[in-house]
Amino acid sequence: MHCRSQLFTLQDLDRMMGSENVLINSSIDLQWPTVLVVLAAILVFSWVTVSKGWLALSGAIAASALGACVVICAGFFWLAPLFFFFGSSTLLGKLLQHKPTTRSDVKQGKPRDAMQVLCNGLVYGLCAALIPLGHEQAGYTGMLISMAVATSDTWSSEIGIAVKGSTWDILRFKRVAPGLSGGISWAGTLGGVAGGIGLFSAVWSAQFIKGHDTILEVGLTFTTAVGVIGMLLDSLLGSAFQARYRTSEGSLADQGEVLVRGWRWMTNDVVNLLSNAATTVAALGFL
């Protein structure tokens, strides 16, 4: 499609869709100065996160692509949930890393790679893509729900591993090592609740500062509850289907030689993606 200026802006797309939504109407105009600023921000973000060891190079590329998609489809405002999720999860990992833990997840404590980024953020990006297609409210609400699930699950894992309280397999009711997918604990569950509250509070605060009053169609209780439900679904899928291997020490882990249950392709990342997608779709259907 060609415009007279040979530049296609989000305002053009908004007029095509007939949308009156305030976020679309106030989103970015993709002129060259804006494009250059976004590209510069992506380069800085990638350099900082890789050099600090927060993201692997593949993870930085995936996160940059996700952020660009969100900016184009939903506007700069909706980077706030992504930044809160990434920043709070990274901070928790750094603050709690000094505590000795059992690392059942081989990626625990390592820079996040592209698979981890996409399995936590792909649903968020797909919901953002609904907005220019005319499904604004489903897109905005789905984004909030998706990131609440991701935040609750990540906070639950980080806090549950650090506290090292009694952890039980959610299906088999047997004690397991803290951090093993499928395990739940009081500390981890409360951490998940805190994650949902924190995510909603961050988005609400950003909305208040920005001056929008029509973005959030769901409240704190619903957002937190859906986040916790998604966290519990993640544990259920992890316990039932995730690959489990027996280590040389006799303990269970998500990588090894001897598969004792689950499917080899069902990794922790895949479980995160499935639980996030299922919870987001179910919540939108409920609404």
Image (cartoon, rainbow, N blue to C red):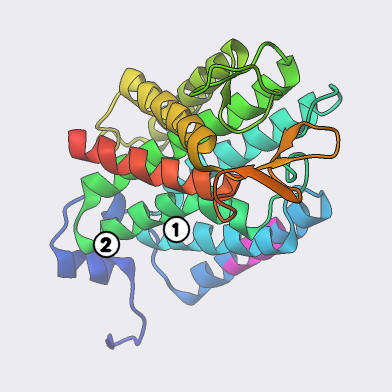
Where residue 208 appears, as percent x and y from the top left, is 39, 29
Q: Secondary structure at mark 2?
A: helix
- In this rendering, position of residue 172 left or right of residue 258: left
Dot 1 falls on a residue whose secondary structure is helix
Judged left or right of residue 254, residue 206 is left
Q: Is residue 114 above or below residue 33?
A: above
Give coordinates of residue 232: x percent, y percent: 45, 27
Q: In the rendered structure, which disc, 1 or 2, sits on the residue that comes first in sequence?
A: 1
Q: Which residue is mark 2?
A: 132
Front residue of 153/253: it is 253
276 with respect to 116 (left or right): left
Q: Main secondary structure of the magenta part?
A: helix
The quadrant holding residue 186 is: top right
Q: In the rendered structure, which segment of residues is drawn in magenta?
A: 39-45
Q: Is residue 283 visible?
A: yes
12 relative to 17 in the view: left or right: right
Q: Position of residue 25 (x, y in %)?
A: 27, 56
Q: Which residue is mark 1?
A: 71
At a point 54% along the width and 64% down the height, the residue shown is: 65
Identify which amino acid the numbered label 2 is placed on: Pro
Q: Quadrant of the C terminus?
A: top left
119 to 105, vertically: above or below:
below
Label count reads 2
